[in-house]
């Protein structure tokens, strides 16, 4: 399993990966990207991830735009949009192309539910 974490904040990527490792063990391959360009480069080099966590607010290209750009090339990828901000009415009116939306900071339990929902962990998610 390949998991890509896309966030412009390094500490968020590190913490999210650490929590995912606690839930999934060492078997997944984790990669981190600091923004849209890095994510696209990684996907071009390594292929589509099975699961991709994408920050909503990033410079140059927000998470919704990035998921829209990459979805066609990665049709089997499960997408999780993460946000540490309240979404504006304009944001809420957008059709969000993610499989799940997760508020930051996420708890271990919330990450587990997302993994279950996306079929990456045994059990059923509550969504």
Image: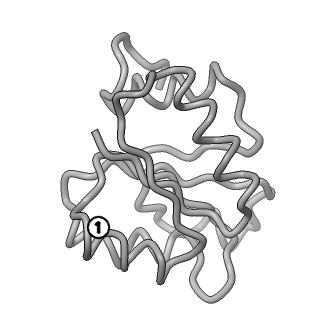
Nearer-the-camera pick, 32 or 36: 32
* Residue 105, horizontal then vertical, whole percent: 77, 41
Quadrant of the rendered structure where residue 48 is? bottom left
Query: Which residue was labeled with disc 1?
Result: 71
Residue at the far top: name it: 123
Up the image or down, 125 lies above or below 77; here it is above
The residue lying toward the viewer, choosing from 126 and 49, is 49
The answer to whether 82 appears left or right of 45 in the picture is right
Rendering quarter of residue 120: top left
**113 relative to 70 in the view: left or right:** right
Looking at the picture, does residue 52 appear above or below residue 23? below
**Residue 104 horizontal/vertical position (percent):** 74, 45
What secondary structure is marked by label 1? helix
Kindly give the residue lying farthest to the bottom in the view shown: 60
Q: Is residue 75 above or below residue 126?
A: below
Residue 123 image offset from top left, x and y in percent? 37, 10
Give the residue at x 72% y 51%. 12
> At x 80% / y 58%, what residue is drawn?
85
Tag 1: Cα neighbours inside 10 Å, few (<14), some, or many (≥20)?
some
Residue drawn where x is 28% and y is 52% of the image:
77
- Furthest toward the front, the residue is 26
Quadrant position of the N terminus in the picture? top left
The front one of 47 and 87 is: 47
Q: How many marks?
A: 1
- Colouring mode (rainbow / by chain / secondary structure / one colour): one colour
Position above or below: 78 against 96: above
Question: Which residue is painted at 21% across and 64% down in the image?
Answer: 47
Residue 32 x %, y %: 52, 59
């Amino acid at each position: 399993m390949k998991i890509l974490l896309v966030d412009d904040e390094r500490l968020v990527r590190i913490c999210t990966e650490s929590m995912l490792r606690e839930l999934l063990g060492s078997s997944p391959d984790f990669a981190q990207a600091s923004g849209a360009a890095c994510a696209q480069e990684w996907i071009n080099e390594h292929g589509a991830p099975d699961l991709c966590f994408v920050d909503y607010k990033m410079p140059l290209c927000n998470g919704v735009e990035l998921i829209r750009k990459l979805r066609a090339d990665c049709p089997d990828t499960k997408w999780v949009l993460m946000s540490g901000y309240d979404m504006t009415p304009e944001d809420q009116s957008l059709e969000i192309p993610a499989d799940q939306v997760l508020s930051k900071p996420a708890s271990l339990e919330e990450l587990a539910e997302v993994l279950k929902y996306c079929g990456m962990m045994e059990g059923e998610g509550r969504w």
